[in-house]
Image (tube, helix red, strand yellow):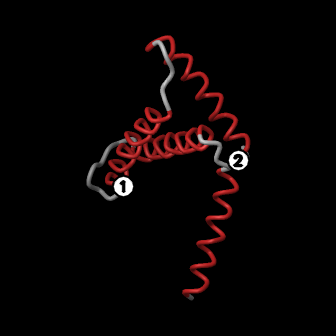
Amino acid sequence: MDFQQMQERARAIRAQYAEVEASTYGRSWTTEEIMLGFLGDVGDLAKLVQGKAGVRPREDLDEALAHELADCLWSVLTLADSYDVDLQGAFTSTMDELEGILSEDA
């Protein structure tokens, strides 16, 4: 799956969530609420990273870590879409910038 396909899939899943939210809560989540959900996911990810360091062991650690990383990626893709950010372009230019900084330091 390429980046554009990932973005489209994230958008489709977000649309499905919006339908469930409207049915359950009478409205879909705001961008701010999506961001709060992302913060919760980042917290869950932090606990799993602790697990990889041996602090919070669990049986399904690798699967849970992969799942949480994917959840976080979905949130980033969804937030970028909400704010009309060309995430692929921003990623490329940011990596180019970082690479340039690191090359200067070498």
- 91 shown above or below 105: above
Categorize mark 2 by other alpha carbons within 10 Å: few (<14), some (14-19), many (20+).
Answer: few
Disc on the earlier residue, 2 or 1: 2
Identity of the residue drawn at 39% across and 47% down: 45
Amino acid type for the residue under numbered disc 1 = Lys
Image spot of residue 42 (x, y percent): 40, 46
- 79 shown above or below 106: above
Q: Under tag 2, what secondary structure?
A: helix
Image spot of residue 57 (x, y percent): 30, 48
Identity of the residue drawn at 35% across and 42% down: 59
Horizontal side of 94 relative to 54 (left or right) equals right
Q: Are marks 2 and 1 in contact (CB under 8 Å)?
A: no
Amino acid type for the residue under numbered disc 2 = Phe
Horizontal side of 45 relative to 96 (left or right) equals left
* Residue position for label 2: 3
Q: CA distance from mark 2 to mark 1?
A: 28 Å
Which part of the image, by quadrant, shows the N terminus? top right
Categorize mark 1 by other alpha carbons within 10 Å: few (<14), some (14-19), many (20+).
Answer: some
Identity of the residue drawn at 41% across and 41% down: 41
Which part of the image, by quadrant, shows the C terminus? bottom right
Q: Nearer the viewer, mark 2 or mark 1?
A: 2
Image spot of residue 80 (x, y percent): 59, 44
Q: Under tag 1, what secondary structure?
A: helix
Q: Find the residue positioned furthest to the left.
A: 55
* Residue position for label 1: 52
Count numbered badges in the picture. 2
Q: Find the residue positioned furthest to the bottom.
A: 106
Horizontal side of 62 relative to 18 (left or right) equals left
Image spot of residue 13 (x, y percent): 60, 28
- 40 shown above or below 12: below
Question: What label sits on residue 73 in the rendered view?
Answer: none
Identity of the residue drawn at 59% across and 72% down: 98
